[in-house]
Amino acid sequence: MKTRRRKYRNIFRDAKGRWWLDYRTPSGKRRRKLAGKSKADADRMLRQIRTSVDVGEFVDSARAPGFTDYLKIFMERYGQHKASWRDGESRVAKFKAHFGNARLSKITTADIENYRIARLAEPDARDEKSTLALATIDREVTMLRSMLSKAVKWQFIAKNPASAVEDYVGDGEGKRERFLSNEEIRTLLAATKRTRSTLLRPSSISRSKPECGKANCSRCAGRM
């Protein structure tokens, strides 16, 4: 009995109406990959794969290690040489507990967002009545982002899923604005008088606080 020939090369649709890719890697390994619900999705993904092969950037996601296995590789190659990773055992343990040994190529941006949500629900270890500071969670995501960027560089995955995760605390958020004291103002202005820069003195004054504590006080400005 003859097998039914496929209508499209490297693309087929299953009984559920889903479209798949059926292709070979540059090393000759056969791979099948779910592309989506339409032929257009499959065509688009196949073009991306062929382009990555042509430019020498193809990554075989089926060869990606599990998360826990990759952590061992990462620590041996990179982490053990960095104090932030050597001293961050508790954070690494949190990563392991959440992601387990899920295949690295299967971890998505949504998975990392879910990790953050789970951490937000946990109490601060130093004060169990308080929740974790947002900056603490940001630091953990920064570590994840760094770790997964190495996975891209080492060709375990094609894309870093943590790159699209934005920090909770942006630049300047949660930081107290500090004004210079009168003594600091006098010291700074004395130093600016010795420079030839026409920009430094006005910018120095704008960051200082008037003696009376009122904004735009002309009397105090004259003293400065």
Image (cartoon, helix red, strand yellow):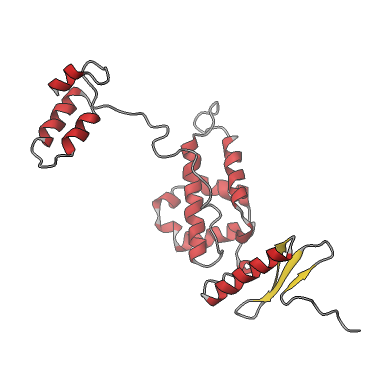
Q: Is residue 13 left or right of residue 82?
A: right
Question: Image quarter for residue 118?
Answer: top right
Tell me if residue 4 comes above or below residue 142 in the rendering.
below
Q: Nearer the viewer, residue 154 or 123?
A: 154
Tell me if residue 71 comes above or below residue 112 in the rendering.
below
Q: Nearer the viewer, residue 133 or 7?
A: 7
Q: Nearer the viewer, residue 56 or 115?
A: 56
Residue depicted at x 57% and y 73%: 51
For the N terminus, the image quarter is bottom right
Q: Position of residue 149 (x, y in %)?
A: 49, 58
- Residue that protrudes farthest toward the bottom in the picture: 1
For the C terminus, the image quarter is top left
Q: Position of residue 128 (x, y in %)?
A: 55, 29
Q: Is residue 176 left or right of residue 149?
A: left
Q: Position of residue 24 (x, y in %)?
A: 66, 77
Residue depicted at x 36% and y 29%: 176
Q: Position of residue 181 (x, y in %)?
A: 21, 24
Count all numbered tags in the image, as a single digit. Answer: 0
Question: Image quarter for residue 196?
Answer: top left
Residue depicted at x 60% and y 59%: 104
Tell me if residue 215 comes above or below residue 77 in the rendering.
above
